[in-house]
Image (cartoon, coloured by chain):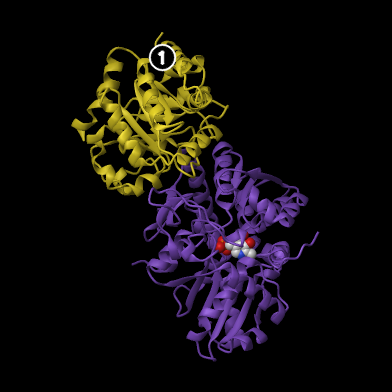
Chain colours: A purple, B yellow
Amino acid sequence: MDKFKDLPDSDGFFGDYGGKFVPETLMYALQELEDTYSKLKDNNEFFANVDKDLKQFVGRPSPLYFAKRLTKYHGGPKIWLKREDLNHTGAHKINNTVGQILLAKAMGKKRIIAETGAGQHGVATAAVAARLGLECHIYMGANDIQRQSLNVYRIKLLGATVHAVKSGAAILKDALNEALRDWVTNIEDTYYIIGSVTGPHPYPMIVRDFNAVVGRELKEQSIELFNKFPDAIIACVGGGSNAMGVFYPFLEEDVKLVGVEAAGSGIKTGKHAAPLNDGKPGVLHGAKSYLMQNDEGQVIDTQSISAGLDYPGVGPEHSHLKDSRRATYIAVDDVEVLKAFHNVTRLEGIMPALESAHAFAALEHLVKDFSKNANLVVNVSGRGDKDINIVATMGGISLD
Amino acid sequence: MESLLIRLELKLNTLKANARKALVAYLVAGDPDLESTLELMHGFVSAGVDVIEVGVPFTDPIAEGPIIQSAHDRSLKKKITLKKIILLVEEFRKKDSNTPIILMGYLNTFLAYAEELNNIHNRGVDALLIVDIPGESNLNEVGIYNKSIASISLVSPTTSLSRVDGICKSSSGFIYYVTLRGVTGSEDLDIKDAKQNIENIRTKTILPIMAGFGIKTSKDAAYLSEVSDGVVIGSSLVEMIHRASDKKDYKYIYNYLNEISEAINK
Ligand SMILES: Cc1ncc(COP(=O)(O)O)c(C=O)c1O
């Protein structure tokens, strides 16, 4: 078997998952992207530019922080936080957009499009497009526009156009459909910055590679701060980009990897967004992967308190890591997530995004498996400012 | 494969022998309901349609513009499944054993019924057109093991000539040339490129080549049929069916198809 780190194969497969399942018109654009990326991949100057932007524009490296009071609260292993919430624009999403916008530039594309759920990827895309003076269009589900209104305004301030998508349940999945349709229509001058390790090959690989800076930093920081690699790394999984970014450099190491999906109202209710826990393999948005679908092969509606995890599919590499048992995937429900959000906020003075709060909520289930000497790292994928309205509403408080 | 490709091949060969162009018509199964779809299919044939493409609805049809998307949604609301669509085809065959039928849709819905698909050639289906599989793949590579069914692939204006060869080799029935850069039903029909691109495809295959996506008027149909072996009409029919769906009076649709049939065979 191929080593995990050597995947995907040349057809874009991670084991059984991945591939390029797209309308014919897009095949040429995917090939063009693949060719450009494989050329630039070994180009030191290109990556020197990416690194420079990550340092000066994003503010990397992000710290590894010891969560003393949270550790005490759980009464088990030492808990460390990888602080992606401190990145410019507030989440890990910017790691990917900083890289992809340079690909777009190298390919001479004049127009940038992206989908967004929580709005973090929309903000991160609009920010890098603004910086290069490129026209930018963000597709967002009409429901997400409501629940993440703060980010919508930020995207507009950054000069991008927000397109409300009303089809389907009007959430992330539907925004992706519409972004793909835009791309099919404007294929020649448009670059599509996908926001997670989803979509057709080569996107899952490219988005992972640009986010892998998180895992590489963590390798150095863990050696520096506790002299070895972590015993476990915990990250939330929507499409799976923050998780894949922090997991990837550790795939061949003896480190437990835990992905946390959104159980929404509870796995048993069927109202959730946890394809790896309660879905089966299928094809959506260009890739084969675990998918929430009914017996007729129709994609079913998802539910989660966090717009960024409210997606019926998942990146194909995660499906492969699940089947081969290299990573474990659990799910936590909305109630657990809110509790964890408040807990971390009060104990550590850090307000995580609701997506990231899923990783914190998982600690409750995981700490018992580790000794006090163990080191657990939670990837704090983003900050919670965007979610204040939701948290207030859930607490019965009106901010108007 | 040969013997079972008979209906589609025979139809297209006969048309060619008579120097006629094919009229291929698309509708979405179950929009507005299955009885109407059946009635429309027979009506299409009487109006001069040679081949019928039956759209299989999917929740996330990324290659479709708003018109066909909405039709998929309406069909799903009626709980139309691939299973019911195959029954519909069997029903159609009771009165029509000549008109080839193609099921057109997205891979995930076909995979959900992979086993059922094994014998659909015996139940009246002649070909599959799966919009979201790479043209070079054979059906069995994507998990559909029926060897007796034609697999129709799309070639678009952006397809590189180097890929056309591989696509044609793994296709049967005909090649579907996409006449625009965009989703179904778009306005920017790309007539200029079509001629050259179709000529290029011809250097790679002896299969007939149909042109489709965005064709609405008999004028466009007439022009495109000159450079191809026939035309596919989709979105404009789906829209007309929807507009007529309360009274279910489809006569004006048949007149429209009649006009196109005449225009491409002047
Ligand atoms: C803060 C944050 N974390 C996580 C996610 C989920 O995406 P992924 O699973 O690709 O990391 C999002 C998506 O919007 C997000 O904004």
- In this orientation, which residue lies closer to the viewer: B238 or B242? B242
Quadrant of the rendered image containing residue B155: top left
The percent coordinates of residue A42 (x first, y second) are: 53, 60
Callout 1: SS:
helix
Q: Is residue A253 or residue A139 the one in the foreground? A: A139
Residue B157 seen in render: yes
**Residue at (38, 19) in percent of width and height:** B43
Q: Which residue is mark 1?
A: B261
Give how far across and how far down residue A7 sits, in percent.
42, 62
Left or right for A106, reference A389: left
Classify residue B26 by image quadrant. Answer: top left
Image coordinates for residue B13, horizontal then vertical, percent: 27, 20
Q: Quadrant of residue B15?
A: top left
Where ligand 1 lies, by quadrant?
bottom right
> Circle 1: is it few (<14), some (14-19), or many (20+) Cα within 10 Å?
many
- Is residue A278 positioned above or below B221 on the image? below
Q: Quadrant of the C terminus of chain A?
A: bottom right
> Which amino acid, by three-letter code, is at mark 1?
Ser
Residue A107 visible at all: no
Please identify the residue farthest to the right as the structure is shown.
A400
Q: Position of residue B90 (x, y in %)?
A: 27, 32
